[in-house]
Image (tube, rainbow, N blue to C red):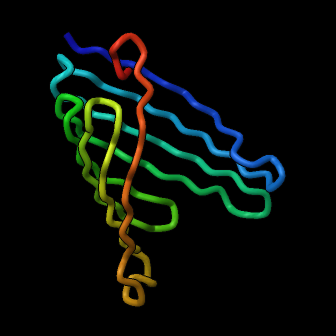
Amino acid sequence: MDIILSEHVWEHLNEENSKRSAKIIYKYLKKRVHFLEPLAWLRFVNGAPLSWDAHVRYHYKDIWWAGVAYRSSQTAVIEAGFMVRKKFQIGYAFDQNISNLAKYTAGSHEIILGYHFIKNNRRY
């Protein structure tokens, strides 16, 4: 049986600088072995244009994941990572600008570290 879960999160990151972030995650689960996690992230800063990210991650059992993303700053992202004891997330991402600036940049590397709070022995 296929299950669809949704999570909506609104974060007020820093009221003094009027930064706000909204994150929307939809998780599509199929027998909890394989699932897709589309993610949209909006960032609002006073005096700056709206910025956004769109991600899609493929998960295998809560063991490892791989994904791609596109950012409004004309940046493409590839990422991969794994879970340690279903609580810690460790990953790597490479960002490459795909605008006219691409010939002047070599991209950027990111290390992803995360902690998942588990309720009732289920991550979601």
113 on left or right of 92: right
User: Looking at this rendering, what residue extends furthest in the right direction?
Assistant: 16
Q: Residue at x 69, y 51 (%)?
A: 44
Give the quadrant of the N terminus: top left
User: Looking at this rendering, what residue extends furthest in the front direction?
Assistant: 85
User: Looking at this rendering, what residue extends furthest in the bottom direction?
Assistant: 104
In the image, 119 versus 68, the foreground residue is: 119
Can you say whether 102 is above or below 68 in the image? below
Q: Residue at x 23, y 36 (%)?
A: 59
The percent coordinates of residue 68 (x first, y second) are: 30, 53
Q: Residue at x 69, y 45 (%)?
A: 13
The percent coordinates of residue 119 (x first, y second) are: 42, 15
In the image, 47 versus 18, the foreground residue is: 18
Q: Residue at x 35, y 82 (%)?
A: 106
User: Picture quarter containing residue 88?
Assistant: top left
User: Picture quarter containing residue 104?
Assistant: bottom left
The percent coordinates of residue 86 (x first, y second) are: 29, 29
In the image, 63 versus 46, the foreground residue is: 63
Label total for image: 0
58 on left or right of 71: left
